[in-house]
Every structure is written in structure tokens, then in C-alpha cells.
Image (cartoon, rainbow, N blue to C red):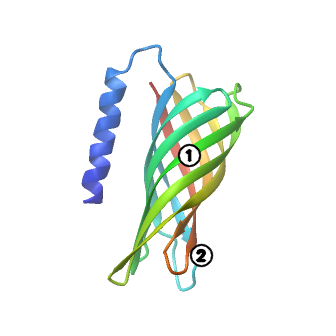
Amino acid sequence: MIRTALAAVLAAVLAAFVAAPAGAADMYAGVRFGQARYNTTGMAKPPTAIGVLGGYTVSPNLAVEAEYTDLGNTGSSRATAMGVSALAFYPGDLPFSLFAKLSYSSSTWKVLNQVQYNSSFTHGLGGQYDINQLMSVRFSWDRYLVGNQVAISVDMLSVAGMVRF
């Protein structure tokens, strides 16, 4: 089911890219890959995490974006998160920039035949390199909270490829 939803989102992003006017370049979409590190004991290997994101560049120093992230399967649990974010870039007009991210995220954590939900503010830091006017690469660290009885933090280290349209 998650793969079907991910394929639908990617198809919608590609359709929007094809239909976008040539000079817009304020909207962007991307795919991120990385590792999720759960702040809990007993985990041998951090799971692979994957996500999709889409955003709008308000100014060279500010962007807003929405994202869906699958924080991986730990064997006994699986977590996903959806959120909206504001990103502040410094310096925003150079090919390489640093950013801080503040998000409001809703997470779902399926563990031992039960589902737990959490909605909270999250944050992240990273750097972005603009390869050209249409393509960028982003390296980031993001912290998510999962679980509703005892919230557990999940740190995601990722690299993302993005296309502007």
C-alpha cells in the first residue's frame, strides 16, 4: 500500500513537472533516501528511510514544503510521517546554502499489533547545493517524534535530489 501511494505521488510530481511553465522555477519536488536512527535500545541496524517532498520558494531565503517520509521497518515496528515545513536558507543566493527547518508533522507508528499517532513540531538542519537552475542536492538531518504514550525521537540522515519547475 505504501509503495502504491509513493508511486501515485511520484506520478503526480512528474505530471506537474511536464505541465509547468518553463519560467516558473519557484516550485520544486524531490526524493530523499537515508537512514533512520530510533532513539531506543535493541536495534542492531538502522533502517533505510525514503521520502518525497514538494515545495515552493517564497524568496531566496525562505521556502515552504510538504513531505511524506517512511522511516523504515525495524522488524517489529514501522513509522511514517507527513508534515509541512518552513525552511530558512543562509545565504540564499549562492549555489551552496545552509538551512534550518521547522515542521509540524503527524506520525504513525505501528508496533506490536497496535498503531500509535503523534502530531508535534519537529526540526532539522542541512545544506543544499544548486547544481544548476533546475536541479539541487540536499543533505539533511531531521528529527521526528513517534508514539503517543512515550514519544520516541527518530533522527533521519538523508540525501535528496530535487527538480525545480
Q: How far across and how far down the image is residue 160, in percent?
A: 52, 45
Q: Is residue 93 visible?
A: yes
**In percent of the image, x 48 and y 48: which residue is there?**
32
Q: How far across and how far down the image is residue 116, in percent?
A: 41, 74
Q: Is 15 in front, or is 109?
A: 109
- Indicate which disc residue 22 carries: none
* Disc 1 residue type (three-letter): Ser
Compared across the picture, whether 56 is left or right of 92 comes to: left
**In percent of the image, x 55 and y 33: which residue is there?**
136
Q: Relative to 28, is 78 above or below?
A: below
* Disc 2 residue type (three-letter): Asn
- Indicate which disc residue 85 carries: 1
Badge 2 marks a residue whose secondary structure is: loop
Compared across the picture, whether 63 is left or right of 1 comes to: right
Q: Relative to 67, is 74 above or below?
A: below
Pair 1/2: label in front: 1
Q: Which residue is mark 2?
A: 39
Give the Cα distance between marks 1 and 2: 23 Å
Name which of mark 1 and mark 2 comes first in the sequence.
2
**In percent of the image, x 47 and y 44: which residue is there?**
66
Asked where in the image residue 115 lies, by quadrant, the reply is bottom left
Q: Is 35 in front, or is 26?
A: 26
Q: Relative to 92, is 115 above or below?
A: below
Q: How far across and how far down the image is residue 36, in percent?
A: 53, 65
Q: Would you say the residues marked 1 and 2 are in contact, meaning their CB atoms lie under 8 Å apart?
A: no
Mark 2 surroundings within 10 Å by alpha-carbon count, few (fewer than 14), some (14 through 19), many (20 or more): few
Q: Quadrant of the N terminus?
A: bottom left
Q: Is residue 142 visible?
A: no
Q: Is 57 in front, or is 164?
A: 57
Asked where in the image residue 81 lies, by quadrant, the reply is bottom left
